[in-house]
């Protein structure tokens, strides 16, 4: 039998270690020549150059990957639970469970455009307009949410909820949200256009049919749609 060399023995020992710890991340490293840092020993070759990665750099990357995976899991779990609630037949039970889920949106790792829109749609389906408005008002105070809050669809849902809730001042806030969104051509989709027409029509009706400007605007936006 051929006698095993020292390098072969090291390779075999390393392989056995990897197999025995398959559920763990294996980071082989050595002390650098200047003794100031630890270097990953499975170096990466980029073209003709060798990219030497420190142990600290590698650990930071691994922790970042874990955070990304954790965020994805939290979002998917939220959406899965949301779908389960929407399948319930009892509206009151849906409302209670949805309001309980609102607490989970305090975690910034859960927040995303898809999550917020799906949650708002669920509230709309059970006609919990107060919860929709309160959520939008709360999220406007949270940093880094403008990228998914200032979309046409979110503006539509907010204005829709305000118009349906119709507390004092709600109609004007709904109209303001619609008009602001409609400044952008991309937001000229049928639901938004019809909603703007509907708000003006409601204003005309509530004026006992005397607000002719609202009537003209209602006709204008309905025709646009």
Image (cartoon, rainbow, N blue to C red):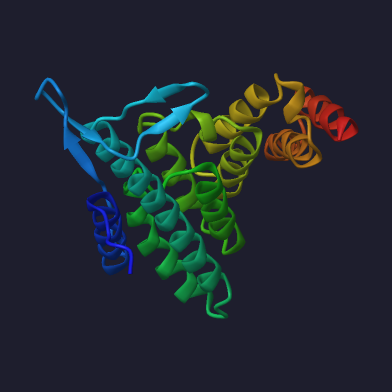
Check the image and name the residue furthest to the bottom: 89
Q: Residue visible at 42% across and 57% down? A: 73
Check the image and name the residue furthest to the right: 223
Q: Position of residue 148 (x, y in %)?
A: 53, 35
Examine the image and state in which quarter residue 222 appears.
top right
Examine the image and state in which quarter residue 58 appears.
top left
**Is 187 placed above or below 63 here?**
above
**Is 84 placed above or below 36 here?**
below
Number of labels in the image equals 0
Q: Residue visible at 59% across and 55% down? A: 121
Residue 211 versus residue 91: which sits nearer the camera?
Answer: 91
**Is 61 placed above or below 132 here?**
above
Q: Position of residue 201 (x, y in %)?
A: 76, 37
With 77 as the anchor, is 32 left or right in this view?
left
Check the image and name the residue furthest to the front: 1
Considering the image in quadrants, where does the N terminus appear?
A: bottom left
Residue 13 versus residue 109: which sits nearer the camera?
Answer: 13
Residue 219 versus residue 119: which sits nearer the camera?
Answer: 119
With 130 as the anchor, is 58 left or right in this view?
left
Q: Position of residue 55 (x, y in %)?
A: 22, 35
Q: Residue visible at 69% across and 35% down? A: 203
Q: Position of residue 120 (x, y in %)?
A: 54, 51
Q: Residue visible at 34% across and 55% down? A: 104
Considering the image in quadrants, where does the C terminus appear?
A: top right
């Amino acid at each position: 039998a051929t006698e095993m060399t020292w390098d072969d023995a090291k390779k075999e020992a390393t392989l056995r270690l990897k197999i025995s710890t398959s559920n763990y991340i294996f980071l082989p490293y050595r002390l650098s020549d200047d003794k100031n840092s630890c270097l990953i020993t499975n170096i990466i070759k980029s073209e003709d150059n060798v990219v030497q990665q420190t142990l600290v750099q590698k650990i930071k990357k691994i922790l970042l990957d874990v955070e990304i995976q954790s965020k994805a899991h939290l979002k998917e779990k939220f959406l899965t639970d949301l779908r389960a609630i929407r399948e319930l037949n009892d509206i009151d039970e849906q409302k209670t469970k949805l309001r309980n889920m609102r607490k989970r949106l305090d975690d910034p790792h859960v927040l995303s455009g898809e999550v917020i829109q799906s949650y708002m749609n669920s509230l709309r389906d059970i006609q919990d307009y107060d919860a929709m408005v309160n959520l939008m008002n709360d999220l406007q105070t949270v940093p880094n949410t403008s990228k998914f809050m200032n979309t046409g669809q979110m503006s539509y849902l907010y204005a829709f909820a305000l118009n349906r809730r119709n507390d004092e001042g709600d109609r004007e806030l709904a109209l303001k949200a619609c008009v602001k969104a409609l400044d952008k051509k991309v937001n000229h989709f049928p639901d938004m256009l019809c909603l703007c027409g509907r708000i003006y029509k409601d204003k005309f009706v509530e004026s006992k049919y005397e607000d002719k400007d609202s009537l003209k605007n209602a006709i204008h936006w309905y025709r646009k749609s």
